[in-house]
Image (cartoon, rainbow, N blue to C red):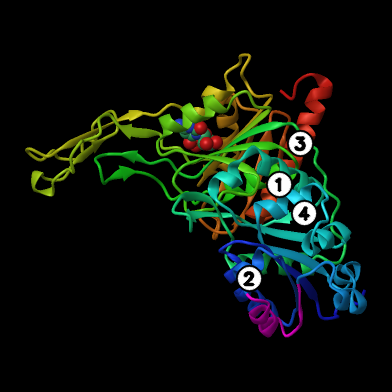
Amino acid sequence: MDPSAPKRVLLIVGGGIAAYKALELVRLFRRAGVGVRAVLTRAGAEFVTPLSLGALSEDRVFTELFSLTDEQEIGHIELSRQADLLVVAPASANLLAKAANGMADDLAATVLLATDKPVLMAPAMNVRMWLHPATVRNVDSLAGDGVRFVGPDEGAMACGEFGPGRMAEPQAIFTAAMGLLASGPVAAPPVRPLKSRRVLVTAGPTFEPIDPVRGLSNRSSGKQGYAIAEALAELGAEVTLISGPVDLPTPTAVRRVKVVTASQMLEACRAALPVDAAVMAAAVSDWRPERVADRKLKKEAGAPEIRLGVADRKLKKEAGAPEIRLVRNPDILATLSQPGPERPQLVVGFAAETDHLEEHARDKLVRKGCNWIVANDVTRPGVLGGEENVVTLLTHEGEEAWPRATKVEVARRLAERIAAALAEGSEAGDAR
Ligand code: C5P
């Protein structure tokens, strides 16, 4: 295939209120010079018309499997053969189920069964349908077959509920599709070395309330932890992501548990055990207010003095000022690293450092009792909150400085290392 030839996408539009967003997706592809041919399912046609899809794609729209003209001019095999990539948006629960089971009872399902091209699906359904074990199973099977997913996002749904199930935005689907088109015609065969492994990942900041409106937190974006959860799931692991408050969608095929405080995070981690590996990427607050005020602290009362256990002598206490005493939070990483029957085979901690990176990180490795520390220098530009990371992996055997890479690349590399260590550990009986 000529790599410079214009790319072509076969867009399958399933049923669901999100089908209207498929029109915007067609527009984005056309603007980028990508050819679009659309297949509209019967349910999809309840939400968008073949006329509007056809007008935007500047091509005819295919709907029926047994349409004589369609089969005469172009068969269903030919439809996928002429495309570089198949995009299913929205991918309804029904369409996912059909594709996961190799059914071929309509044109969309038949094309999906007949194709040897990469497939990208953008699921959209009610939150309960998305979380149902049958859909989880179907997504897992499809991912095992090499199907890629984008979304779903979390948010308010047309049915009035809230949660994961909203179709990813057209721009996100477009970006994912362009990535697959750029990576060439060969869909990478799925490698799932973590199949049937359970992994726990913590991510994001914690938030420790002071009063009903204020609290102590930090600027962790959660991006690295979320990317790790996604990379582990891509390798087949059953991932539980325990997340502090962040504005990120649940990664595909990952079970997310939302928490606010460090104590809640520890409790959620304990509930997720037993696991084969735990990756603690969350920026957990070391301290929390001893007491949470049940009413908003008033400024008229003067500035609160924050005392870190021992009072800072430089701070003069104002008469009548509220005083916030801080107490230590549990150390989740150290707790999970303690020897015992529930200890994961591999426990990975993170160390965000501003100076003496290796020295501090190695000290943490010993103090916390974990197997590995992923250390990053947060003074490097673009690391905090950005898309890239520069990390050093420290183990009890040695250390490796990894080159600057995107957080997604760092996550993939770490997931592969975890898969290798667990495989080795199973052979040797233990990864410790
Ligand atoms: O001690 P420090 O916060 O620098 O250690 C960072 C590592 O410890 C991270 O992996 C973080 O998730 C974990 N941690 C934890 N519970 C805490 C503090 C840190 O799990 N209370």
C-alpha separation, residue under disc 1 versus residue under disc 2: 21 Å
| Residue under label 3 | 194
Q: Position of residue 315 (x, y in %)?
A: 19, 40
What is the quadrant of residue 210 in the picture?
Answer: top left
Q: Which residues fall within the magenta stretch?
A: 49-62
Q: Position of residue 264 (x, y in %)?
A: 43, 31
What is the quadrant of residue 75 in the picture?
Answer: bottom right
235 lies above or below 5: above
Q: Amino acid at mark 1?
A: Val
| Residue under label 4 | 147
- Residue 22 is marked as 2
C-alpha separation, residue under disc 2 versus residue under disc 3: 34 Å
C-alpha separation, residue under disc 3 versus residue under disc 4: 17 Å
Q: Pick the residue in front: 414 or 176.
A: 176
Instruction: Tell me whether circle 3 and circle 1 mark residues in contact (CB < 8 Å).
Output: no
Label 4 Cα neighbours within 10 Å, binned few <14 / some 14-19 / many ≥20 = many
Q: Pick the residue in front: 419 or 169.
A: 169
Q: Residue at x 55, y 31 (%)?
A: 364
Mark 1 or 2, nearer chain start: 2
| Residue under label 1 | 139
Q: Position of residue 373 (x, y in %)?
A: 62, 36
Q: Amino acid at mark 4?
A: Val
Secondary structure of residue under mark 3: loop
Instruction: Tell me whether circle 1 and circle 2 mark residues in contact (CB < 8 Å).
Output: no
Q: Is mark 1 within 8 Å of ligand 1?
A: no
C-alpha separation, residue under disc 1 versus residue under disc 4: 9 Å
C-alpha separation, residue under disc 3 versus residue under disc 1: 16 Å
Q: Pick the residue in front: 159 or 286.
A: 159
Left or right: 311 with respect to 121? left
Q: Residue at x 74, y 40 (%)?
A: 236
Mark 2 or 3, nearer chain start: 2
